[in-house]
Image (spheres, rainbow, N blue to C red):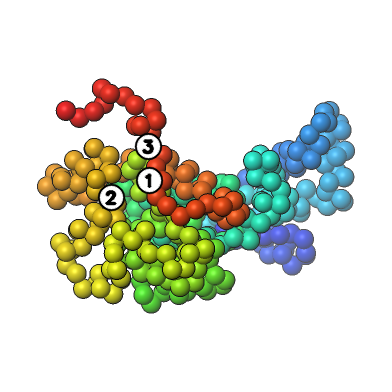
Amino acid sequence: MAVYKPHLFSLGNAATALAFREFIAANNAVIAIDYIGLMIAELIKTRNPGASFSEEMMRIKTTEFLGGKKMEDYGVWAYYPWLNRVVHVLAEEDFIELRTSRNQYKILPEEQKALRTKKIGIVGLSVGQSVAVTMALERCGGVFRLADFDVLELSNMNRIRSGVHEIGELKVVNTAREILEIDPFLDVEIFPQGLHRDNMEAFFQENGQLDLVIDECDSLDIKLLLREYARQWRIPVLMDTSDRGMLDVERFDEEPDRPILHGLVGDLNATALSKLSTEEKIPYILKMVGADTLSERMKISMKEIGKTIRTWPQLASNVVLGGGITGDVARRLLLNYGVKSGRYYTDLEEIIPDERAKIQ
């Protein structure tokens, strides 16, 4: 399987420093990127928001900050094998402090600290990629568990931020790399076979129980199964559908007896569903998404599946909106703001209507 984690070198001791220099000497094609002086200067300015520094004063403050260390020995060198680059970044706590500094005070310092302890599971990495990257950008979690068995295809690239050189790569690897290129100190775990009965417990429990599950997978069987596990362990579930900005919130942590998917699929469970044919599953899928509440263009699209289109459409604008909505609600839920179960809509066509766009 493809490598997705950077190798981190901290040159604080002689052995690690020697290993790093030997690595660089043996791999002279590796590109070194070192703007550590710029990062240190920005950190100093951030810690002194009312101050103004001359070049000479900044040199003095930088020397004080380094405390006698050489600049090249301070911090961490992160080697990204898939990029063939090694990047010099701030030490972990300094890095996190500076990277999240523009979150304050929309996220309070104590809230940011609490979010570092949270473990987030994300299943399905189309809309899920947007959610995962949004939450990583805000650092609304310390551990991210990603599950998807699928590979990136060209038709995915109307909504998944990737380059053509990544076609054929596992979506879960692609997303993990993007997160760790933003922040090499986040903990990312991947499940490249997707979720199934045999690994469900590991996804929810291994290395600590998840605090939140975000469901963006296509399989109704897995949607039901993961909710059965989430309800058993009292873990909340969020799901965005990228149509009309619809977001489902299921607070199994507060309501362990809550009906799965708001009771829209009745008493159907994953075991019973697995015995149904694809055709027999369709009525349940329509109940789950709320066929009568779909956007007009999605209703038309659903009738064309298997005729003129292969599957339902998803637009980048809807997926990015869904990532933002889900990320925002996830943060507030994790911080115990009192988010309640329910189905919510952020329908831009209702908020900002355009009558001429309607299909005749």
Residue under numbered circle 1: 246
Residue under numbered circle 2: 290
Inter-mark Cα distance, 2 to 3: 15 Å
Looking at the rendered structure, the kind of residue marked 2 is Gly
First in residue order: circle 1 vs circle 2 = 1
Circle 3 residues within 10 Å: few <14, some 14–19, many ≥20: some
The quarter of the picture where the C terminus appears is top left
Mark yes or no: residue 259 visible. Answer: yes
Extreme residue toward the left, this view: 307
Residue under numbered circle 3: 347
Circle 2 residues within 10 Å: few <14, some 14–19, many ≥20: few
Q: Are marks 1 and 3 in contact (CB under 8 Å)?
A: no
SS label for mark 1:
strand
| Lateral position of residue 54 relative to residue 175, left or right | right
SS label for mark 2:
loop
First in residue order: circle 2 vs circle 3 = 2
State the image coordinates of residue 187 (x, y, percent, origin top left).
Answer: 58, 61
Question: 317 or 180: nearer the eye?
Answer: 317
Inter-mark Cα distance, 1 to 2: 10 Å
Q: Are marks 1 and 2 in contact (CB under 8 Å)?
A: yes
